[in-house]
């Protein structure tokens, strides 16, 4: 196993000039350091990140002793890359606050340049076998930049903030480049299933790439989406909560606050954390329950953050003004309702606050996960705290026993705080115990283990883009095997494979030259010719009436064996209720897309857009596919985006099952030649034995071993294989 190369915007250390004038390297605290620090220390890998501009040589040496690699970022670049694009465009937008987002092309260009510098450093440090794991929204272009230079590297990415709904994401001017950047990774990790779902739909709607079951086969690599909710170092927090330092701090707090009940808020100063609305809810609580005055206190800890951005400064002023107003309104000598601090807090002091607080108010407007909620639960060694948690924090999907609030509903939040204060001690304990168990089992070490295992897992049967071959060259390769065979099977798709697409589906009748080729194969004394098509049985009957080959219609739903005139059904037609609504949806898209049409089959419905404007058609196909997938999630059908069509068909019927039916009836075969051009043919390619020849027509990624450029090249190949009287014209 190779090394782990961790990559994050900041290295987990800060440089501080000591009294003697020399630079000290101080380890930072925070969730990411707690998560990745142990992995870095236990292994022999590297951590790549920035610690500021120019480094003194001594410092650089010290860093490299700890296996840290610094990427220099100048102050001007930090303004464009970090304060600019990362935190003034991506951060607000991904937290559903587009009105705060500033989109500035030149800041994006700085973001791109700094991402490129990170990627260059990764490439320089990389050794074959290493795993690369890139963290967070400041580095979203890095996976692709690295992939371009290291096509075989194992690359993971993790997003610590929400991935918004595609309707929000599409506001981002650089949406295409950002998504392509992320898709350079093998595994793109998110905290929750919702974020992963949003990403999949953004990729479909923006790029038209269909991540079936969260997986996309791209040129040369496979990208997969994963859900890994981050945890905390539960054990460490537990220990800290009972440490001597924490006990001392608790004693001090107790002697100061006496019997007063303590409500706690801890957050980085950030407008996503919903501090002003929380203060409003606290004011409402005091207004509604005057009796609480002097009996409860809110300790609000605000950790300084991103002070160079104006909106953060405004947020600070707003909070401080509100704190002043509430204290002015409700305070009297000896009674200060809100104790506010704006500075960073040592971990032991924080643990003491968590432990002593009767209620924690974690009420962000949006939050990727929120570690404070989990740290609060971990520190409930006495089991008597109550967590009030916003439904807009990622943590809400794991912490079901918390009292859930909508932070926008100020009255509702005030009532819930009251309920938390009044809660029966037994109920508090039960709720906390349930959450604690979960937080201990799913701690940060498990998070890292699972994510890394997913990144390092070898991808099953990679799709690749096989190099297209010349028909004669390919024929020379196949012919000796064909001649040896006693019972060869020739499995051909029709549209797009041996027949060029036409404007209207019904215009794609076989040409003279196609019929000639097929007859040529039929004349072969041993070969079994099988046409495996998505077309319906009537069309195939009509078009191939003079031929005796075996026909498969509707991707395997129907079979007409060689020499017979009756069609047999592959299996029972299941419940067709879905068809009515789907048909209505397809008709609606047909109305909206001039030139498109609907085809009805027994087990499927198809929307064709080959005659429509290609751009409009593709756009509509994406919209339609994602709508269908939402709508049909629980139906026994699958949605397939084909070449110039979208098909909804009954599950469990495909070209692989069709092949098996034919093999049972006519086989066993000792030679296989399978040709096809679209997604439905991939099933066939994977069904034939490894020794067979699978040939993809038209280029692009495929499971097939070989590739050929066009239907006319496909016909030339067949002629070369089956016409022993030399080449004939098309
Ligand atoms: C982002 C996402 C996601 C508290 N006081 C100080 C201090 N802390 C620590 C806390 C906690 C961390 O900071 C805050 O983590 P959060 O998760 O609450 O929020 P973000 O900083 O916004 O983190 C978030 C997280 O990434 C992990 O994926 O959960 O959704 O927004 O651990 O204990 N840290 C320092 N000084 C303090 O005074 N250094």
Image (cartoon, rainbow, N blue to C red):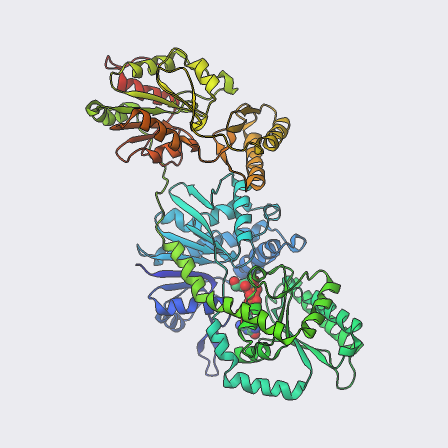
**In this orientation, which residue lies closer to the viewer: 231 or 701?**
231
Location of residue 547 in the rendering, given as x and y in whole percent from the top left corner: 37, 13
Residue 240 seen by the camera: yes
Residue 334 placement, left or right of 371: right
Residue farthest bottom in this picture: 255
Residue 190 placement, left or right of 424: left
**In this orientation, which residue lies closer to the viewer: 253 or 558?**
558
| Residue 46, quarter of the rendered image | bottom left
Residue 538 placement, left or right of 703: right
**In this orientation, which residue lies closer to the viewer: 481 or 417?**
417
Location of residue 191 in the rendering, given as x and y in whole percent from the top left corner: 52, 58
Quadrant of the frame with the N terminus: bottom left
Location of residue 359 in the rendering, given as x and y in whole percent from the top left corner: 64, 74
As drawn, 450 above or below 169: below
Quadrant of the frame with the C terminus: top left
Residue 75 seen by the camera: no
Q: Quadrant of ligand 1?
A: bottom right
| Residue 300, quarter of the rendered image | bottom right
């Amino acid at each position: 196993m190779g090394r782990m190369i961790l990559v994050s915007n900041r290295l987990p250390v800060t440089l501080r000039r000591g009294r003697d004038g020399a630079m000290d390297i101080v380890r930072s605290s925070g969730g990411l350091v707690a998560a990745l620090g142990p992995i870095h220390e236990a292994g022999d890998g590297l951590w790549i990140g920035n610690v500021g501009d120019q480094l003194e040589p001594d410092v650089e040496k010290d860093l490299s002793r700890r296996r840290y690699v610094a990427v220099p970022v100048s102050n001007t670049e930090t303004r464009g890359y970090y304060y600019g694009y990362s935190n003034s465009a991506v951060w607000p937008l991904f937290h559903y606050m587009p009105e705060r987002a500033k989109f500035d092309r030149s800041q994006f260009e700085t973001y791109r340049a700094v991402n490129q510098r990170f990627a260059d450093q990764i490439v320089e440090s990389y050794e074959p076998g290493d795993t690369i794991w890139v963290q967070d929204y400041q580095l979203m272009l890095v996976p692709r930049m690295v992939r371009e230079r290291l096509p075989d590297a194992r690359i993971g990415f993790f997003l610590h903030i929400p991935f918004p709904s595609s309707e929000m994401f599409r506001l981002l001017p650089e949406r295409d480049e950002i998504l392509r950047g992320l898709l350079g990774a093998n595994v793109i990790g998110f905290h929750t299933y919702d974020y992963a779902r949003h990403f999949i739909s953004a990729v479909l709607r923006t790029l038209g790439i269909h991540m079936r079951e969260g997986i996309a086969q791209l040129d040369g690599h496979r990208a997969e989406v994963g859900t890994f909710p981050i945890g905390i170092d539960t054990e460490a927090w537990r220990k800290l909560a009972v440490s001597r330092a924490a006990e001392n701090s608790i004693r001090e707090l107790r002697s100061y606050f006496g019997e007063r009940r303590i409500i706690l808020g801890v957050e980085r100063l950030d407008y996503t954390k919903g501090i002003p609305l929380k203060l409003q809810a606290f004011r409402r609580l005091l207004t509604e329950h005057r009796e609480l005055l002097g009996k409860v206190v809110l300790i609000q800890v605000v950790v300084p953050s991103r002070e160079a951005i104006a909106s953060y400064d405004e947020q600070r002023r707003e909070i401080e003004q509100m704190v002043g107003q509430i204290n002015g309104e409700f305070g009297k000598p000896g009674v200060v309702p809100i104790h506010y601090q704006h500075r960073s807090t040592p971990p032991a002091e924080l643990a003491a606050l968590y432990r002593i607080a009767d209620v924690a108010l974690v009420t962000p407007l949006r939050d990727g996960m929120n570690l404070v909620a989990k740290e609060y639960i971990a520190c409930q060694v006495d089991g008597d705290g109550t967590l009030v948690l916003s439904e807009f924090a990622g943590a809400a999907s794991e912490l079901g026993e918390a009292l859930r609030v909508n932070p926008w509903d100020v009255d509702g939040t005030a009532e819930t705080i009251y309920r938390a204060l009044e809660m029966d001690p037994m109920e508090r304990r039960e709720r906390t115990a349930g959450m604690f168990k979960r937080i201990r089992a799913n701690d940060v070490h498990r998070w890292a283990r699972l994510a890394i295992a997913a990144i390092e897992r070898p991808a099953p049967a990679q799709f690749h883009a096989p190099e297209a071959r010349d028909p004669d060259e390919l024929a020379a390769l196949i012919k000796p095997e064909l001649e040896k065979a006693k019972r060869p099977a020739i499995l051909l798709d029709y549209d797009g494979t041996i027949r060029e697409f036409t404007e209207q589906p019904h215009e794609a009748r076989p040409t003279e030259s196609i019929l000639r080729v097929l007859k040529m194969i039929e004349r072969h004394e041993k070969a079994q010719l099988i046409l495996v098509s998505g077309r319906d049985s009537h069309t195939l009957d009509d078009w191939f009436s003079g031929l005796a080959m075996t026909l498969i219609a509707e991707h395997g739903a129907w079979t007409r064996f060689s020499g017979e005139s009756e069609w047999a059904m592959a299996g029972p037609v299941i419940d067709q209720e879905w068809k009515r609504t789907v048909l209505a949806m397809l008709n609606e898209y047909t109305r909206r897309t001039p030139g498109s049409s609907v085809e009805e089959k027994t087990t499927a419905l198809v929307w064709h857009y080959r005659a429509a404007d290609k751009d409009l058609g593709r756009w509509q196909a994406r919209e339609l596919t994602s709508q269908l997938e939402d709508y049909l999630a629980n139906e026994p059908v699958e949605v397939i985006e084909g070449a110039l069509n979208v098909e909804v068909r009954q599950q469990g019927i495909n070209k692989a099952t069709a092949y098996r039916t034919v093999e049972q009836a006519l086989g066993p075969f000792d030679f296989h030649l399978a040709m096809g051009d679209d997604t439905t043919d991939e099933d066939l390619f994977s069904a034939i034995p490894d020794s067979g020849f699978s040939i993809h027509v038209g280029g692009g990624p495929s499971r097939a071993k070989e590739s050929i450029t066009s239907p006319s090249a496909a016909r030339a190949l067949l002629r070369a294989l089956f016409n022993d009287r030399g080449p004939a014209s098309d």
